[in-house]
Amino acid sequence: MAEDSIMVTVRCLAFNHAKYIRQCLNGFIMQKTNFDFEVVVHDDASSDGTAEIIKEYADKYPRLIKPILEEENQYSKGGNILHNIMNSHTRGKYIAFCEGDDYWTDPLKLQKQVDILEQHPEYSMVYTGFQTVDEEGKAILRPDYERYMRVSFTGDIFPYLLRYGNFVLTVSICLRKEHYMGAIRENSPCFLDFNTVIASCANSMAYYLPEKTCCYRQSPNGMMMTQGKEVSRKTQKIRKYIVGLYLDGKIQKRGFLRHNIIKIDLLVFAFHLYKNGADKDYIKWIFKRDSSFLLIAPIAIIVGVIRKMK
């Protein structure tokens, strides 16, 4: 398989996912496409037999499954090591994601997404609906995740990412590599899924497929469950970085009305953080960054009160 023939690189991170990894890998194998794609599966020195299962699949499907089997855990070293490792093995024009405990359910997932991206250069990313499952793979309803799909739409989702935070599930997306590896994401002060989505949509639009093409597994060992406070801290740091780029004109300014709605949203969020004691310095930073925020402060207060009443 020549490097220039690879249309999509699927990036799969696994660690102690022996219970789930077969279902994950089977979701890749069942994909029906008219193009070549590869699956880079990184095992971070699992101790439960995950690596052996990955090797089994790589031996059986050598043109598709490309394993990276670590002898020493890389994540524990800190920094952005895993991201850099995966970048060095990413050859596709587009990138899709699925961690070792999640899985795809639609055999046409990649084909549908690539068809849209190939036909519509105005879209940088295609994301889809999803099903949340528990550890045993049983479908469950999580109100916050169901809300993600209700607010999802095709178009300019960047302002809504600033307002709501990340409502796009990484397991569902396929995006253009140049956006993922571009300066906005690569220069971020820290890295989460939020980086991937907001950097991809900063200067372009996203396409939403409402059909559920994948499953996100809710696990007690997941990052949000075990490192919730740290994730919140990093998310706020990323948001501040992105807001700074937007206010400095390094991210495409929206039209007059949309731009001012964004500014009101930013101020409403800043007031929320201040009131809840989460970040009292953010509101000072906002006013210092752009003095025009002082003019819209009364409007932002009214908007904040109305939203709280809903």
Image (spheres, rainbow, N blue to C red):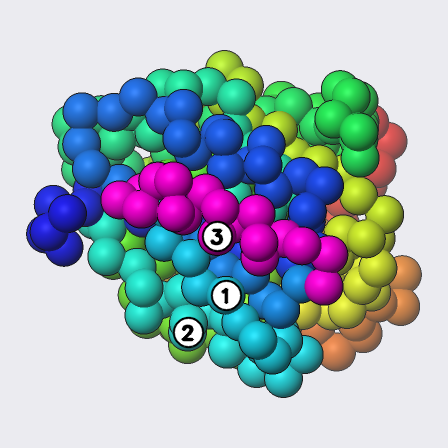
* Helix, strand or loop at mark 3: helix
Q: Which of marks 3 and 2 is nearer the N terminus?
A: 3
Q: Does the magenta stretch include residue 60?
A: yes
Quarter of the figure with residue 61:
top left
Q: State whether residue 5 is above or below residue 131.
A: below
Q: What stretch is highlighted in magenta?
A: 47-64
**Vertical placement of 307 versus 246: above or below?**
above
Pointer 2 or 1: first along the chain:
1
Among the 4 quarters of the image, the one containing residue 190: bottom right
Residue hosting label 2: 84
Say above or below: 42 vs 137.
below
Q: Can residue 91 be seen in this view?
A: yes
Task: Give neighbour class at mark 3: few <14, some 14-19, many 20+ (Cα, 10 Å).
Answer: some
Image point 81% across, 74% down: which residue? 280
Q: Residue 290 carries which label?
A: none
Residue at position x 84%, y 37% in the image? 308
Q: Mark 2 Cα within 10 Å, few/some/many (few <14, many 20+)?
A: few
Q: Name the residue under label 1.
A: 69
Discs 3, 1 touching: Cβ within 8 Å: yes
Q: What element carries label 2?
A: helix
Instruction: Pick whichever, 289 or 120, lies toward us.
Output: 120
Mark-to-mark CA distance, 2 and 1: 15 Å
Q: Which amino acid does label 3 sit on?
A: Lys
In the rendering, at what x and y percent does residue 189 appear? 53, 78
**Residue count near mark 1 (Cα–Cα under 10 Å), binned few <14, some 14–19, many ≥20:** some
Mark 3 in CB contact with mark 2 (< 8 angstroms): no
Residue 55 numbered tag:
3
Which one is in front, 211 or 56? 56
Secondary-structure class at tag 1? strand
Q: Please check the rendered image and state whether residue 264 is part of the magenta-colored stretch, yes or no.
A: no
